[in-house]
Amino acid sequence: MNIILLGPPGAGKGTQAQRLVDNHGMKQLSTGDMLRAAVKNETPTGLKVKAIMEAGELVSDEIVSALISDELASMGPETGAIFDGYPRTAAQAHALDQILEAHGRTLDKVIELEVDEDALVDRITGRFTCASCGTGYHDRHKLPKVEGVCDVCGGTEFKRRPDDNEETVRTRMQEYRSKTAPILPIYEERGIVSRVDGMASMDEVTSSIEALLA
C-alpha cells in the first residue's frame, strides 16, 4: 500500500503517519526529513542540497525526486510508503507516477485530513509543552492537574513554539491550500482521494484511516 497523506500543519498528519508505521510496518517518506538526513550524512545528493541551501535557493524537483527514488530503492517491495510533503505541485505528482512505476509500485490512496480553520487555530495557539520532558498540554483542553506542575515529571517550566500564533497558523493554512489545490484534481480524476475528519480525536482519525486501507 502506497499512500499520500495530506493535511495542513497541526492537522495531526505526523501522529497518523507514525501510527501507520507502527501498525503496518510502512515507511514515512518526509521530504524535509530526507533532505536534512542527506545533508547530515554528506551523501552526494546531500552535498548538492547543502550548497543550494547555503546559496539561499530552493531545492529542485529533480533532487527531491532523486531522494524519493533512492529511498524506495532501499525499501523491500512489501513495505508500503507514506508520502508526506510530496508531491506539492502537478509536476511533482507526475514525477511521482514515473518514480513509482520505475520501482514497480502504484499509488493506492490519497488521504486528506480535513480541518476547520478556526478550530485549528484554537488547537495550535493553545498548545504548550513541559520544558523538561516534552509532555504536551493545552490552555483549554488539557491543563496540568496541578497548576504550573507537569503531571509526568513534576517540572515547573513550560514552553510554547514561537510560531504557534494565529497569524502564522492562518498563513500556513493559506500556503497549504495553494499548494494542494493543483494536485488534488489529478488524483480525484483517478478516484483515489478520500477525506477524513481531522478535527476528530486522534483515535477516531486512526480508525477512519484504517477503514480506508482495509
Image (cartoon, helix red, strand yellow):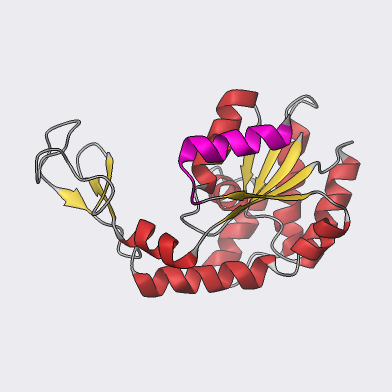
Residue 180 location, x and y as percent? Answer: 68, 65
| Residue ID at (73%, 27%) | 79
Q: Is residue 85 visible?
A: yes
Would residue 72 be found to the left or right of residue 169 on screen? right
Between 191 and 102, the residue placed more toward the observer is 191
Q: Does residue 80 sit above or below 32 in this rendering?
A: above
Magenta range: 199-213
Residue 212 location, x and y as percent? Answer: 71, 37
- Quadrant that contains the C terminus: top right
Between 22 and 41, the residue placed more toward the observer is 22
| Residue ID at (62%, 38%) | 208
Q: Does residue 87 sit above or below 22 in this rendering?
A: below
Would residue 9 be found to the left or right of residue 132 on screen? right
Would residue 45 be found to the left or right of residue 17 on screen? right
Is residue 110 in the magenta section?
Answer: no
| Residue ID at (72%, 57%) | 87
Q: Is residue 55 visible?
A: no
Residue 61 location, x and y as percent? Answer: 73, 62
